[in-house]
Structure formats: C-alpha cells, structure tokens
Amino acid sequence: MKTAYLFLTYLSLLTLCLCLCPSRAATDEAESLMRWKYSLSSSASLESWSVNNISNHCIWIGIRCNDEGSVSGIDLSGADLAGTLDLFHFTALLNLTTFNLSGNYLNGSVPAALGNLTSLTLLDLSNNSFAGAIPPEVGRLTELRYLSFSENSMFGEIPYQIGNLRKVRFLDLGSNYFETPKWSRFPTFPFLTHLNLGINELNLEFPHFITTCLNLTFLDLSQNKFTGQIPESLFTNLVKLEYLNLTRNGFQGPLSPNITNLSKLKDLRLTENLFSGKILDSVSLIPSLQNLELYNNSFVGEIPSSIGLLTNLRSIGLGMNRFNSSIPRELGLCNKLTYLDLSQNSLLGPLPPSLSNLGNLSYLRLFKNSLTGEILTSFITSWRKLIWLVIQDNEFSGELPSEIGLLTNLEYLFLYNNSFSGTIPPEIGNLQKMSWLDLSTNNFSGEIARVINRLNGSWKTMHYIPY
Ligand SMILES: *[C@@H]1O[C@H](CO)[C@@H](O)[C@H](O)[C@H]1NC(C)=O
Ligand SMILES: *[C@@H]1O[C@H](CO)[C@@H](O)[C@H](O)[C@H]1NC(C)=O
Ligand SMILES: *[C@@H]1O[C@H](CO)[C@@H](O)[C@H](O)[C@H]1NC(C)=O
Ligand SMILES: *[C@@H]1O[C@H](CO)[C@@H](O)[C@H](O)[C@H]1NC(C)=O
Ligand SMILES: *[C@@H]1O[C@H](CO)[C@@H](O)[C@H](O)[C@H]1NC(C)=O
Ligand SMILES: *[C@@H]1O[C@H](CO)[C@@H](O)[C@H](O)[C@H]1NC(C)=O
Ligand SMILES: *[C@@H]1O[C@H](CO)[C@@H](O)[C@H](O)[C@H]1NC(C)=O
Ligand SMILES: *[C@@H]1O[C@H](CO)[C@@H](O)[C@H](O)[C@H]1NC(C)=O
Ligand SMILES: *[C@@H]1O[C@H](CO)[C@@H](O)[C@H](O)[C@H]1NC(C)=O
Ligand SMILES: *[C@@H]1O[C@H](CO)[C@@H](O)[C@H](O)[C@H]1NC(C)=O
Ligand SMILES: *[C@@H]1O[C@H](CO)[C@@H](O)[C@H](O)[C@H]1NC(C)=O
Ligand SMILES: *[C@@H]1O[C@H](CO)[C@@H](O)[C@H](O)[C@H]1NC(C)=O
C-alpha cells in the first residue's frame, strides 16, 4: 500500500517535472549561453542570464524562443558586450533564425562554426571590432535574407561561397578592409535590393555580377580603388536603382547618355573619380533626382539648361570640375534646392535673376569662378534661409544691398577677392549668428573698422579675416 502510494507520488512528480522542467535540449541551450556570457569581458546587460533563471531562458533579455521553447532569435544589439564569439556554442543553438549583435565591442574573428546555423535568415554583426576573414562556411547559410558584417576591421578576399546565398536581399560588407575576389565566381542574386561594398580595399574593374542583380535599388561602391569604365549594362539593366554611390574611386570615361535609363534614381554620387567630357542632357533627364554630386572630376563644357527639369533636386554639387559656361537661368526652376555648389570651375557671366526663386537655399558656394555682375536685392530678400554665402574669388561688383541684414541665419559670409564697391552696410551688424566674415580685397569705401568695432562688441565667436 505504502509502496504503491510512494510510487504514485514519484510518478506524478515525474509528470510534473516532464511538463515544467525544461527539456535536455533547452537546458543545453541555456547552459551554452551562460558559458558564452562568462567568457565575455563586459556583459552587465545580461543580468537576467543567470543560473537561478536557467529554466526561464526564453524570457532572458535578448532571447526569443519558438513555440517548443527552443531559442530562435537573439537580439543583443547595442548591449555593451565586449569579448569574442570563440566560446559561443553554435551547435547548441541550431534553431536560431535571427541573430543581431550589431553595435557592440566584440572582437576576435568570426568562427567557422557559424556556418552550422543553417536556419538563419538574419545575421547582423555590424559595428563591432571583428577582425579576420569572412569564413567560407557562411556560404552554408542559404536561408539568409539579411547579412551584414559592416563597420568592423575584417580583411581578406570576400569568399566566393557568399554566392550561394541566393535568397539574400540585403548584403552589407561596407567599412572593412576586404579585398577583391574573383568576381567571375559570383552568380546573380535575384532578390538582392541593397548592396554595400563601400570603404574597402577593392580594386580592378567594376564587378560584373552586380549588373545582373536586377532588383537592386541601393548600390554603394564608394571609397575603394576600382578603375575603368562603368559598364553600360549597369544603366540598361539596373532600372530599379534609387541610390548609386561610386564616390572616391578611379572610374573614368564620359557619362553615358544611357544613364537616363535609371529613371528611379534619387541619389547619384560620382565625386572624386576621373570622369570626363560633357554632361549634356544625361543627368538632366532623370527627374526623380534629389541629390547630385559630381565634385572633383574632369567634366567640361556647359551646365545644360535642361538642369531646370530636375525640379526635385535638394542638393547639387558640381564643384572642382572644368565647367565653363554661364549659369543657366533654368536653374531657378529647381526651387527645392537647399544646397548649391558650383565652386572651383570656370563659370562666366552674371547670376541669372531667376535664382531669386531659390527661397529654400541654405548653402550657396560659388567661389573660384569668373562670375560677374551684382548680387541683386531680389536675391537677398528671397534667400532668407542662407547659412553660407561663399562667393569669394570671382569678379562680382556693385554695392552690397543693405537687405543683407535680413539674412539672420548667416554664419559664413565670404566675399573676398571680388570688385564690390560702396560702403559696407551697417546692417551686417545685426547678424547675430555670423562666425566667419571676410570682405577683404574689394573696392569698398568708408570705414570697415567702424563695422568691425561694432561686431567686436556683440559677437564673441567672430573671426574677422583682415586684409
Ligand atoms: C530545435 O527545436 C525543436 C522543436 O522545434 C526541438 O525538437 C530541437 O531539440 C531543437 N534543437 C535544439 C538544438 O535545441
Ligand atoms: C529571470 O529573468 C526574468 C526576465 O528577464 C527576470 O525578470 C527575473 O528577475 C530573473 N530572475 C532571476 C532569479 O534572475
Ligand atoms: C539590429 O539591431 C540594430 C539596433 O537595434 C538595428 O538598427 C538593426 O536594424 C538590426 N538589424 C536587423 C537586420 O534588423
Ligand atoms: C555603433 O555602436 C555604438 C555602440 O552601441 C553606437 O553608439 C553607435 O551609434 C553605432 N554606430 C552606428 C553607425 O550604428
Ligand atoms: C579584444 O579586446 C580586448 C580588450 O581591448 C583585448 O584585450 C583582446 O586582446 C582582444 N582580443 C582579440 C582576439 O583581439
Ligand atoms: C559545425 O561547424 C564546424 C566548423 O565548420 C564543423 O567542423 C562541425 O562539424 C559542425 N558541426 C555540426 C554539428 O554541424
Ligand atoms: C525581384 O524580387 C521579386 C521579389 O521581391 C521576385 O519576385 C522577382 O522575381 C525578382 N526579379 C528578378 C528579376 O529577379
Ligand atoms: C553613398 O551614398 C548613399 C546614398 O546614395 C549613402 O546612403 C551612403 O552613406 C554613401 N556612402 C558612404 C560611404 O558615404
Ligand atoms: C546604350 O546602351 C545600348 C544597349 O542598350 C548600347 O547599344 C549603346 O551602345 C549604349 N550607348 C553608349 C553610348 O554606350
Ligand atoms: C535608355 O537610354 C537611351 C539613351 O538615352 C535611350 O535611347 C533608350 O530608349 C533608353 N532605354 C530605355 C529602355 O529606357
Ligand atoms: C580630388 O581628387 C583627387 C583624386 O582624383 C584627389 O587626389 C584630391 O585630393 C581631390 N581633391 C580634393 C580637394 O578633394
Ligand atoms: C569651354 O571648354 C571647352 C573645352 O575645353 C572649349 O571647347 C570651349 O570653347 C570653352 N567654352 C568657353 C565659353 O570658354
């Protein structure tokens, strides 16, 4: 009787335990997470990961479980973790589908055993201090949609096995020291929309596989050592592109008229390359453009009047080229412009009166050209948002309108090396935000000193650059 009773108690305890006590696999998961935690040199945010709590690992901070109580997601982004992944027991966590460690201080290399997590759809190791190469085993993670190693100190050739990740939509290897692989071993990525290879050590010609990724909307190859021409197939194939950044490379050649096939392009950055020739109507026929940066190339000839078709432009930078026309009056149609930089070219003639339509302008940089004529009162009264008026080293003349005192946001006023005349309007003294002012080498008459004294009284951060 007593024995039977005891046995029954034992049985019910066992049942209770089977229901409430975690399974062996779950305990393995919890224990291996604990072991990794103990290996870290900083893990204060993981307070809930404790041996007292070992059976509750599904409610630990950063942990998500599936319906069976097995870890399926880890999000420890920005958790102040320092240490390595060396003791992360990947094979105990085979149900992981999402893994986000972005924004920590993790270092060491990325272990090859990561390749065992074959259910992963999201892997974000960005913004850490990982070094070493991408393990080729990453090519086993064929369910990945999102992969980022960006902002680490990783190096070596990008393994061609990355080409196995046929489902990937977002691929970010930016801001590391990666070197050029044999791109010919890379296939197309049919679903890829976002590709960032910017800020690495990549060289040689434009990687051909990119022009077969027909779903791309974002492409960043900036700050590498690429050379040669941009393949025409980029323009004729990647018609969904919205962002194209090739800044700081050695790309060369003229801008193909086929670039107008990129009819969704919003942001085009070609700064600091070796592009040459005339821009003609090429970029002007992409009305979706909001930001156009062509600085420091060898473009020549005219700024086409068709630029006036780009009525969505917010920002345009054509500085440091060899444009040698006048400024087309159609530029005044781009009335959403907040940033206009045509500096360091050979532009001629006066500013067209239509520029008074640019009422949103905050930054105007026209320095080092051969521009002539006056700064019209109508400009000043409509450019009320100006923060920078940087037009030195030109041939501007005439008097400064006293309305300049209305530009209360002005911080930089550089007029030096022009032919302005008349007296300096004392209203300049009203400009409380001014921090840099240089009026030198002009034909102003009267007492500059009087204005400056007044400035000295009220503007503590004032830097006056004297004659
Ligand atoms: C993965 O989850 C399943 C249930 O969904 C479970 O049977 C299995 O033990 C788990 N694997 C690991 C390694 O925890
Ligand atoms: C266990 O983890 C939960 C969830 O993070 C937390 O609220 C609780 O305080 C922890 N309990 C112990 C004993 O650490
Ligand atoms: C990872 O976490 C960071 C910070 O919360 C977040 O910005 C990022 O989008 C996450 N990554 C993914 C792929 O969701
Ligand atoms: C990188 O991570 C640090 C620490 O979490 C964070 O402060 C910073 O904003 C992150 N940088 C980016 C670009 O996300
Ligand atoms: C990781 O960083 C810590 C602290 O800066 C350092 O002591 C350790 O040597 C680094 N480990 C590796 C593998 O780079
Ligand atoms: C995990 O990955 C390592 C390194 O790639 C490999 O040697 C090991 O066999 C894998 N383990 C399992 C269970 O797949
Ligand atoms: C683009 O992606 C969609 C799904 O997002 C897919 O249906 C389509 O086949 C892809 N297009 C190409 C050309 O690969
Ligand atoms: C390149 O340009 C894109 C926008 O087109 C921008 O989001 C990205 O940050 C730029 N890359 C770098 C390295 O500045
Ligand atoms: C523009 O692309 C077509 C193919 O669509 C090609 O035949 C033509 O040569 C290209 N134009 C230039 C200037 O390269
Ligand atoms: C591509 O651009 C060229 C040159 O501007 C043009 O002749 C051609 O019709 C465009 N093709 C498409 C499909 O828009
Ligand atoms: C312009 O680009 C060249 C390389 O093409 C570079 O050496 C130079 O520093 C750049 N100039 C400026 C002012 O950025
Ligand atoms: C502009 O430069 C081009 C090529 O360098 C030259 O042929 C043309 O005459 C120049 N135009 C003006 C107005 O100086």
Image (cartoon, rainbow, N blue to C red):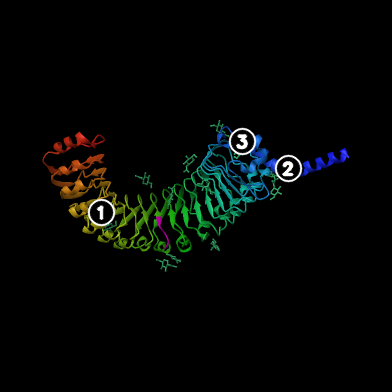
Nearest the eye: 231 or 107: 107
Q: Is residue 88 left or right of residue 233?
A: right
Residue type at the position of mark 1: Leu
**Alpha-carbon span between mark 3 and mark 2:** 20 Å
Mark 2, residue position: 24
How crowded pointer 3 is (Cα within 10 Å; few <14, some 14-19, many 20+) is rated as many
Q: Is residue 165 left or right of residue 447?
A: right
Of badges 1 and 2, the one in the foreground is 2
How crowded pointer 2 is (Cα within 10 Å; few <14, some 14-19, many 20+) is rated as few
Of badges 1 and 3, the one in the foreground is 3
Which secondary structure class fits the magenta region best?
Answer: loop
Mark 1, residue position: 347
Q: Is residue 15 left or right of residue 171?
A: right
Mark 3, residue position: 37
User: Bounds of the magenta span?
Assistant: 263-267
Q: Is residue 264 magenta?
A: yes
Please state the horizontal and vertical placement of residue 254, each as a whole percent of the image.
Answer: 38, 58
Please say whether residue 292 is visible from this viewpoint. Answer: yes
Q: Earlier in the sequence, mark 1 or mark 3?
A: 3
Query: Secondary structure under badge 3?
Result: helix
Please state the horizontal and vertical placement of residue 212, each as a whole percent of the image.
Answer: 52, 60
